[in-house]
Amino acid sequence: MKIMLDSNVYDQIIARDGFSNRLNEAVQRGHIEILKTHIQDDELTRIPDPEKVRAVSEVPGQEINTSGSVWGVSKWGKSCWGDGPADIKFDDIQRGNSKHTNDALIAITAAAQADV
């Protein structure tokens, strides 16, 4: 099962003792595959606490390209052109509010490439 986590979920994972280890075990056994984009990594590396950055970096994840791109946000070679190939489109999430750009890119990517 392929899953994608929003950036704020990583806080919940590291807040629970041993949960990151359980995720690693599930990934290693092939029960789940955690997908992520450069968007999650970019947001997580801006955490001001270096220990927290280290902890979230240990959460497993396979980086994939976003299923859309936004000038000034998306990275070359880590995104696809368009507004999302799935039933959920970029504008459905962002709704013209630039504060929701990262959420929209994560959501359309999850809708297109993840099971959950």
Image: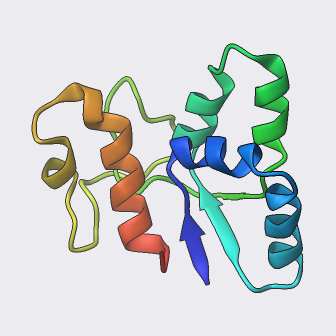
Query: In this view of the protein, can residue 78 be seen by the observer?
Result: no
85 or 10: which is nearer to us?
10
Q: Is residue 40 above or below residue 106?
A: above
Residue located 20% across and 50% down the image: 93
Residue 47: image location, x then y, percent: 65, 21
Residue located 46% across and 48% down the image: 79
User: What colour scheme was applied to this rendering of the protein?
Assistant: rainbow
Q: Is residue 61 above or below residue 91?
A: below
Furthest residue to the left?
96
Furthest residue to the top?
48
66 or 23: which is nearer to us?
23
Q: How many numbered discs sit on the rendered protein?
A: 0
Residue 75: image location, x then y, percent: 51, 34
Q: Quadrant of residue 25?
A: bottom right
Residue located 80% across and 60% down the image: 19
Q: Is residue 51 above or below residue 77?
A: above
Residue 16: image location, x then y, percent: 76, 51
Residue 97: image location, x then y, percent: 16, 30
Quarter of the image where the N terminus is located:
bottom right
Q: Is residue 41 left or right of residue 69?
A: right
Query: In this view of the protein, can residue 88 be seen by the observer?
Result: yes
Q: Quadrant of residue 109?
A: bottom left
Residue located 77% across and 28% down the image: 52
Q: Is residue 28 left or right of residue 38?
A: right
